[in-house]
Image (cartoon, grey):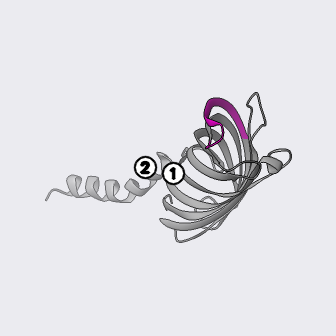
Amino acid sequence: MRPRSLLAWAVLAVSSPTLLAAQGDIRLALGGGISMPIRAYSDVADKGWLGTASLTYFPGASAGLGFRLEGLYARHGLSVASGNQTELGGTANAVFQFGARRSPNRFYVFAGGGYIRTRTSGPSFGTISSTDPALNAGAGFCFGAKAFGLFAEARYLGVYTSGTKPQFTPLTVGISFGGL
């Protein structure tokens, strides 16, 4: 092998991790937990459960600011009538993480908005559905290895409907894949 081609391969091998890290940090997370109604919504609905899936991107130039797309499904029993209410939707969030970028243990905060489809059903009133804007904000902690981690987070989620506004605080735990 020529000395120049050997030098080219050596430069490529040393710079590849740096070039890949410059492209950014992408994480996939799956979680579940409990959803507790608050304010006037707690008079209508009982505690329920929640499932989430999210994709978070931290650009290479940013040490802590990222973008997260998230889907969620929640289900609550109704306390005023026999029936249930489900929420299905998605949000787009800005995420800011504290601490060293390459550390697998991070505290983060997030906030954003999206749309949630609320479906209320019961034997006495049938099914009522609507899709409405929603806002959410929260904080969490991720810990574990660099490519695999566990997370726990809490948030406020409010759906802006014309009737009783579903407002709840999900407590979620789960796993995340990817990242640095």
Q: Residue at x 72, y 48 (%)?
A: 81
Q: Is residue 155 visible?
A: no
42 relative position to 11: left or right: right
Q: The N terminus lies in which quarter of the figure?
A: bottom left
Tag of residue 120: none
**Identity of the residue drawn at 30% across and 59% down:** 10
Locate residue 139, reporting x and y percent: 73, 55
Question: Magenta region, mostly helix, strand or loop?
Answer: strand
Furthest residue in direction left, as rendered = 1
- Which badge, 2 or 1, comes first in the chain's sequence? 2
Query: Which amino acid lies under the numbered mark 2 shown in the image of this protein?
Result: Leu
Residue 153 x/y as whole percent? 69, 60
Label placed on residue 25: 1
Residue bounds of the magenta highlight: 122-135
Would residue 65 be counted in the magenta stretch? no
128 falls in the magenta region: yes
Tag 1 secondary structure? strand
Q: Mark 2 points at which residue?
A: 19
Foreground of the two, 100 or 77: 77
- Quadrant of the image occupied by residue 89: top right
